[in-house]
Image (tube, grey):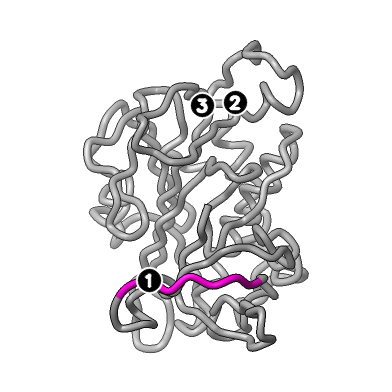
Amino acid sequence: MNIHWLKMTDSTNLDAWRNKDAAEDKTVWCAEYQTAGRGQRGNRWESRQGENLMFSILFRPRGLRAAGQFVISQICSVGIVRYLAELGLDARIKWPNDIYIGDRKICGMLIENTLKDDTLAVSIAGIGLNVNQRVFPPELPNPTSVLLALDNAVTGLEGTPGLSPEEELPRLLHRIFELYGQMDADGHVPGLEEEYSRLLYRKGIPAEFEETEYVTGGGLRRFRGRILGVEKGTARLLVEKEDGQVAKYYFKEIRFVL
């Protein structure tokens, strides 16, 4: 695997962008520490030095139509869930691509794309997976890590030994690249959409949500509903409300109430 191991960088996503014209498909940058790591919604991604996996993958999905770009998110999300399953952890995908153990976030993802005409030229997936960290800043509402999850799942005690990021990253990448290698010219991976849908966090379970200002035009509007799945073609989240109406949401139009 073509992995660039870094002690420190501003952001592995920025490393990928700086090298996007020359780097080969499936090139990876991984850093022990990021000074300007970024997450979704413009948030910073905080991580203790050397304890977690912070990396970015550069994809060159030849011929993939821009309309089908969500497949990259699905490939990375399902690949990470498969990797965690190998460790004995039952993970779910909080739409569109956060990874949760129970009601706690173990992994975040930021995917950025560039287009050439109507096809995807480059896709960069920035991924932060909490591996060995046991203590988190108090402002983070619901974090967990592989070690914390293993403590709960296996021993019930704080006794799970730490994992080696250098050994775990290739194992994780293998699961992602395994799916990526199955993608055909139309951006289809056999069974991927079904597996992604099955793994959706809170799917079919009545729960609280909030419509954001992108829908309401003002403040937040809370409602109760249940996730049905994801709309093909648009990747919108399908949520059935208590009155039976099925609403469709783009990213940033809905929030989960945790």
Q: Nearer the viewer, mark 3 or mark 1?
A: 1
Q: Which of marks 3 and 2 is nearer the N terminus?
A: 2
Residue to which mark 3 is pinned: 166
Q: Nearer the viewer, mark 3 or mark 2?
A: 2
Q: Which of 115 and 67 is in front in this view?
A: 67
Q: Quadrant of residue 93?
A: bottom right
Q: Is 207 inside the magenta-drawn segment?
A: no
Q: Where is residue 160 in the image (x, y as percent from the top left)?
A: 65, 15
From mark 2 to mark 1, how far is it between C-alphas?
Answer: 33 Å
Residue extent of the magenta highlight: 219-225
Q: Quadrant of residue 229?
A: bottom right
What's the residue at 28%, 46% (across, down)? 44
| Direction from residue 241 to residue 212 in the image, left or right | left
Q: CB of mark 3 within 8 Å of CB of mark 1? A: no
Q: Residue 148 carries which label?
A: 2
Q: Nearer the viewer, residue 191 or 231?
A: 231
Residue to which mark 1 is pinned: 220
Q: Is mark 2 on a helix, strand or loop?
A: helix
Q: Nearer the viewer, mark 2 or mark 1?
A: 1
Q: CB of mark 3 within 8 Å of CB of mark 2? A: no
Query: Against 82, is 157 above or below?
Result: above
From mark 3 to mark 2, how far is it between C-alphas?
Answer: 19 Å
- For badge 2, the amino acid type reads Leu
Q: Where is residue 16 in the image (x, y as percent from the top left)?
A: 32, 52
Main SS type for the magenta part? strand
Q: Position of residue 77 (x, y in %)?
A: 59, 56
Q: Which of marks 3 and 1 is nearer the N terminus?
A: 3
